[in-house]
Image (cartoon, coloured by chain):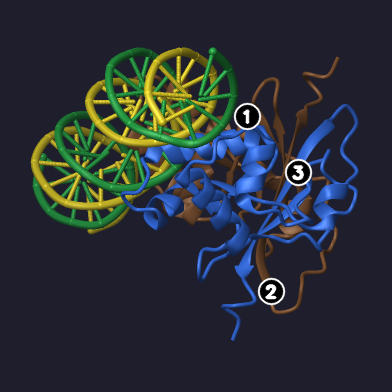
Chain colours: A blue, B brown, C green, D yellow
Amino acid sequence: MFNFNEMKKAAQILDELGFRKTEIRLKVLDHLQKVNKAVSQPELEIKFNKFADRVTLYRILSAFEAKGIIHKIMDAHGVARYALCNHKHCMEHQHHDEHVHFNCTECGDVVCLDTVKIPALKLPKAFSSAKINLNIEGICNHCQK
Amino acid sequence: MFNFNEMKKAAQILDELGFRKTEIRLKVLDHLQKVNKAVSQPELEIKFNKFADRVTLYRILSAFEAKGIIHKIMDAHGVARYALCNHKHCMEHQHHDEHVHFNCTECGDVVCLDTVKIPALKLPKAFSSAKINLNIEGICNHCQK
DNA sequence: ATTTAATTGCAACATAGTTGCATTTAATCA
DNA sequence: TGATTAAATGCAACTATGTTGCAATTAAAT
């Protein structure tokens, strides 16, 4: 996984990964850095309305994921979301892909809870785990009253 | 949640829940009881090819879920799957909807691991959890060599 | 047997995601 | 700087999952 602790500028990141610094890619990466949430293609499509084609957004997200700068998760509605991981915890666990994601039923936001770690699970014999995804649905800090 | 420990016949279950005993509903419920896996509408559509309309299957699954005899989960590919819960563990945790689901990357099967329980998680303050779903991807017992 | 509400089938639609291909453009090179 | 080229984009078309409205059917009650 890419080291985001240094909080590099989007342009520099694209450069180092061998991507061209196109306006859309810069905007998408910049947005991901700013919001610190797991965003979906439909969300980006609305955000960058008429600025980029749907397909382009899908391809940008796939390309970023392939390079490991973002990770893909399925949210509670079965929609793919992508997020940067810029916390130390994520770096440590890069090989397990163990993430806790919080789906807010109020605002719909999905955030990566880097501070919550998944305790080890005892699987039944003959089952081997490669990847774990823990989805929590509830009310997030912003929507709590 | 319905008590499946008694392993009632499909017809009796439909009866008790106020559903009509139509052939499709009997078949679907019977299938869910037999396979003991989380099945999707597309799978049922293939299984019951030309016997039931796509929409009918979606509606049967929704109706069963609304009555609480099956539960709905999103699998690793974002597809809705439904499964009966006939183990004691599931009964105990009925109000939390805490399930561990194993997605086999070999055969594609999704099974509910009733024996694995999710340890309590410490969420950051101001986050409140209503529902937890833990998806594990890996190789299941049948595909293990 | 008649009635009626539940169930089904069909058509049409909505949304997420993918693929092929022609066009554009960022970055390299001469 | 201008020409070259591979990367990136846009468009059209397609697939899959899932939903809604409505008319036709049917299980079950009277």
Name the residue rendered at 77%, 59% in the picture.
Answer: A114
In the displayed structure, C17 sits above or below A91; it is above
Q: Secondary structure at mark 3?
A: loop
Label whose residue precedes the other's in the sequence (1 or 2): 1
Give the quadrant of residue B39. Answer: top right
The quarter of the picture where the C terminus of chain A appears is bottom right
Q: Secondary structure at mark 1?
A: helix
Q: Which x, y percent locates residue A140?
A: 62, 72
Q: Nearer the viewer, mark 1 or mark 2?
A: 2
Which of A144 and B91 lies nearest the eye of the viewer? A144
**Which chain does the numbered disc 3 sit on?**
A
Q: Which x, y percent locates residue B85?
A: 67, 46
* Residue that label 1 marks: B34
* Residue that label 2 marks: B127
For label 2, count other residues whose C-alpha is less than 10 Å away and answer few (under 14), some (14-19) or many (20+): some
* Residue that label 3 marks: A2
